[in-house]
Each structure stands twice: as C-alpha cells, then as structure tokens.
Image: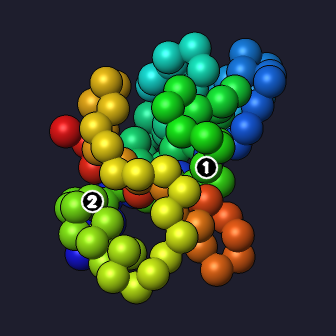
Amino acid sequence: MSIRRVMPDIRSEAMEESRDFYGLLGFEEVMNLGWVMTLASPSNPTAQVTFMTRDETAPVVPDMSVEVEDVDAIWALMQERGAEIVHPLQEEEWGVRRFFVRDPNGRVVNVLTHL
C-alpha cells in the first residue's frame, strides 16, 4: 500500500496568524476553504501542515492526515482488524474520498485519496 504524504492537522481559531507565522518558515498557502487551510513548502510540496477551525462533515478535527493510493483497501483492512472508525468512508465535495480512524494512542487519523 502506497503512502503519498502525511501531514499534521492542527485545530486553530487563529488561521491568519498561523499562515503568517508558518510563512516565516517558508510555507505558502496552497488551499483555503475558510474552515480548513493547507500550507506547503514551495520546494517540497508534500511537506504540508493543515489548520482547521472545524471539520465540515465529520464530528471531530483529525490529528493528522495520511494520503494513500487506495483508500478503499485501507478502509477494508481497518474494518477487518476491528479498528474504531470515527467517520465513515465517503466522498467529499472538495475532491477527496476519506474516513477517520482512531489509532492506539487515541489520535484521530484522516485517511484519504484525492479523486
């Protein structure tokens, strides 16, 4: 199973301030839907950090996101192993297919594939 990127998801009520702060480290805004904003390194676009005020369709803000090649295969594996699914597998209007699963440390992982 191929992992494409991993990024931290940070709950924030200071979106603009976060963008400005991480801009000092060289990050640039690559996506902003108002409630979620992703910053990336211009020299390494898979080096990213996401800030969220909330999640538009899920009950919680995830702790991290893992983009995989085949989210359906990971979904099936997680169900088979009895992992705690926090948010069901579904396609989102912003172009991803995703689900949330809780890891053994209690952290919520957003597992996704871009459509």
Q: Quadrant of residue 105?
A: bottom right
In the image: residue 69, left or right of residue 55: left
Residue beneath the point at 45% across and 23% down: 31
Query: Which residue carries the number 2 mark?
Result: 71
Residue beneath the point at 19% across and 39% down: 115
Which label number is shown at residue 62?
Answer: 1
Q: Quadrant of residue 21?
A: top right
Percent position of residue 55, x then y: 58, 32
Mark 1–mark 2 Cα distance, whole angstroms, equals 16 Å
Percent position of residue 16, x then y: 73, 16
Q: Quadrant of residue 23?
A: top right
Q: How is the model colour-coded?
A: rainbow
What is the tally of numbered marks visible in this picture? 2
Quadrant of the drawing holding the N terminus:
bottom left
Local packing at callout 1 (Cα closer than 10 Å; few below 14, some 14-19, many 20+) is: many
In the image: residue 115, left or right of residue 20: left
In the image: residue 19, left or right of residue 76: right
CB atoms of marks 1 and 2 within 8 Å: no
